[in-house]
């Protein structure tokens, strides 16, 4: 490398990505070649004050973001080409957990109560009551989402019921309700705003008109005065496609004046990382829960098992179909705790477990897509005196691939055949799981080169918005690594799915009802 090339390498811009997730906040620093040059992670605690309740602390969440950024900047290799990133960071991109909601005092910025997690089911009673009143069709038609307590609306109603039951402060605009993107942008000086894709996950947005729905606000009892102004995922402030307008200086002194040029929900960001915004491909993000998502046209219709949502808005809103699974990585963590081991050891045990007899249906808070059944209960079925801990581990790991397979089938019913699955998240390091995923779906699975797809997607969009990459250059960045091809025969696949759907039917308490639950489950999930 010549002296000129060395100088140029040191002057190339960097982009910082922050992924605020359920269990941790991660930060990465990416160079102009698309390579990660530094990373850091800070764990985040969850509280379970009662069955079905999952809470986090908004202040702890903010501190974790600040600490992750500081750790990432401090982790840059001394003496390397990027050892002094100050002044070279062109932009910051944020990726955030979705559906979780928090309420704070507009004047002081102090949270009122907990951040209510997307995993929390405290809105189940309200959703059941609204469904009983015949509101489910209105909710689905307007928001694109099924009436389910996973989404933000019922949680927002609960927060207001406990902190402003008469809604007087909310109507006066003294209280702010927001998802995690709103909370972070507020702390970054961006005002009370929400990114469009995250807003589409609240169940309060008219997904086609892209404005807060008066009908849904009235239905859930949420005053619009407490809600954020909706902005695009990226774009110049004040323009017709105004995006987030925040300064990253609150994250670290060296970032003063560096703009936040992109904000996305975590699953949306992962989809962008896989596809560079190009349609026609489906990604699976494995985490505490899992998301299956693919871009679709604005006129797309969703099978009842999946949702219509907005992935991002970079001047043009990008619609997507998505199915959300409530417990995948959480299932592994749960069983590892029961067996007194670690998640990695559980995955190793699973490779010597027997497949096909014992099933775990992890409906710890009901079942998400494609069933959307909050009455379902977690069960283990098919075990006997000869069952071993290895068999339980196998059942837990296999339940991840089987649940994803059910959502992929529902997506294909809505949008046609899926060519291949693009996978990301920590569990993609488990080659046994990835091969099983290919086998039970019958699709090729391609794994992301790096596990930080959500953070990378935020980086890619932020970098494109700030001129670090053109869209053509963005499309050419390396994305995928290992490839898995199905080896299971069609008959074996059908048998595996039939056994799984029989277990799902038991979890859903349908076996004693007329019409044959197992047939219903098999028809919907295969």
Image: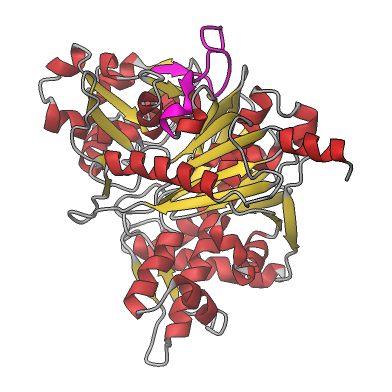
Name the residue located 62 percent from the left edge and 40 percent from the top edge: 84
Q: In the displayed structure, does residue 7 sit left or right of residue 455? A: right
Q: Is residue 169 magenta?
A: no
Q: Is residue 134 above or below residue 523?
A: above
Q: Which residues are magenta?
A: 229-251
Name the residue located 69 percent from the left edge and 54 percent from the top edge: 449
Q: Is residue 491 above or below residue 22?
A: below
Name the residue located 19 percent from the left edge and 18 percent from the top edge: 170
Extreme residue toward the right, this view: 2
Measured as percent of width and height from the top left, residue 414 is found at 60, 39
Residues 440 and 342: in front is 342
Quarter of the image for residue 187 reads top left
Name the residue located 28 percent from the left edge and 39 percent from the top edge: 59
> How many discs mark residues in the rendered view?
0
Q: In the displayed structure, does residue 490 sit left or right of residue 525? A: right
Does any portion of residue 270 appear in the rendered image?
Answer: no
Measured as percent of width and height from the top left, residue 299 is found at 60, 23
Q: Main secondary structure of the magenta part?
A: loop
Q: In the displayed structure, does residue 221 sit left or right of residue 143? A: left
Measured as percent of width and height from the top left, residue 8 is found at 79, 34
Quadrant location of the C terminus in the rendered image: bottom right
Quarter of the image for residue 459 reads top right
Quarter of the image for residue 443 reads bottom right
């Amino acid at each position: 490398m010549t002296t000129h090339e060395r100088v140029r390498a040191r002057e190339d811009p960097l982009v910082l990505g922050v992924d605020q997730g359920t269990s941790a906040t991660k930060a990465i620093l990416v160079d102009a070649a698309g390579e990660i040059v530094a990373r850091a992670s800070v764990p985040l605690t969850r509280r379970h004050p009662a069955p079905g309740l999952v809470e986090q602390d908004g202040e702890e969440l903010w501190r974790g973001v600040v600490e992750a950024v500081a750790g990432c900047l401090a982790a840059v290799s001394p003496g390397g080409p990027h050892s002094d990133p100050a002044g070279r960071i062109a932009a910051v991109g944020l990726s955030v957990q979705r559906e979780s909601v928090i309420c704070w005092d507009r004047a002081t910025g102090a949270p009122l109560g907990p951040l209510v997690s997307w995993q929390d089911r405290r809105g189940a009673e309200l959703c059941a009551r609204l469904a009983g009143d015949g509101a489910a069709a209105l909710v689905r038609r307007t928001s694109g989402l099924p009436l389910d307590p996973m989404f933000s609306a019922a949680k927002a109603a609960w927060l207001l019921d406990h902190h402003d039951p008469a809604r007087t402060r909310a109507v006066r605009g003294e209280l702010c309700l927001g998802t995690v993107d709103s909370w972070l942008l507020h702390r970054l000086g961006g005002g009370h705003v929400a990114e469009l894709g995250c807003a589409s996950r609240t169940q309060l947005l008219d997904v086609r008109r892209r404005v807060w729905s008066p009908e849904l606000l009235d239905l859930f009892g949420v005053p619009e005065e407490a809600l954020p102004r909706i902005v695009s995922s990226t774009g110049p402030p004040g323009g017709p496609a105004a995006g987030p307008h925040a300064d990253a200086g609150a994250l670290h002194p060296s970032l003063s004046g560096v703009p936040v040029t992109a904000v996305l929900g975590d699953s949306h960001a992962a989809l962008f990382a896989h596809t560079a915004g190009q349609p026609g491909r489906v990604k699976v993000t494995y985490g505490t829960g899992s998301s299956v998502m693919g871009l679709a046209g604005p006129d797309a219709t969703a099978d009842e098992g999946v949702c219509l949502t907005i992935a991002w808005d970079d001047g043009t809103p990008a619609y997507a179909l998505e199915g959300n699974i409530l417990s995948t990585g959480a299932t592994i963590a749960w069983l590892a705790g029961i067996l007194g081991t670690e998640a990695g050891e559980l995955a190793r045990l699973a490779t010597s477990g027997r497949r096909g007899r014992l099933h775990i249906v992890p409906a710890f808070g009901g079942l998400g897509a494609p069933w959307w059944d909050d009455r379902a209960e977690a069960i283990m079925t098919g075990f006997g005196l000869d069952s071993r801990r290895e068999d339980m581990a196998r059942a837990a790991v296999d339940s991840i691939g089987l649940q994803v397979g059910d959502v992929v089938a529902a997506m294909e019913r809505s949008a046609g055949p899926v060519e291949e699955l693009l996978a990301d998240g920590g569990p993609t390091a488990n080659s046994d799981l990835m091969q099983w995923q290919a086998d039970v779906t019958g699709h090729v699975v391609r794994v992301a080169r790096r596990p930080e797809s959500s953070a990378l997607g935020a980086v890619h969009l932020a970098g494109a918005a700030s001129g670090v990459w053109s869209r053509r250059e963005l499309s050419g960045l390396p994305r995928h690594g290992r490839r898995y091809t199905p080896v299971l025969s069609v008959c074996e696949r059908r048998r595996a799915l039939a056994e799984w759907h029989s277990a799902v039917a038991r979890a859903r308490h349908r076996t004693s009802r007329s019409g044959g639950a197992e047939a219903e489950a098999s028809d919907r999930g295969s």
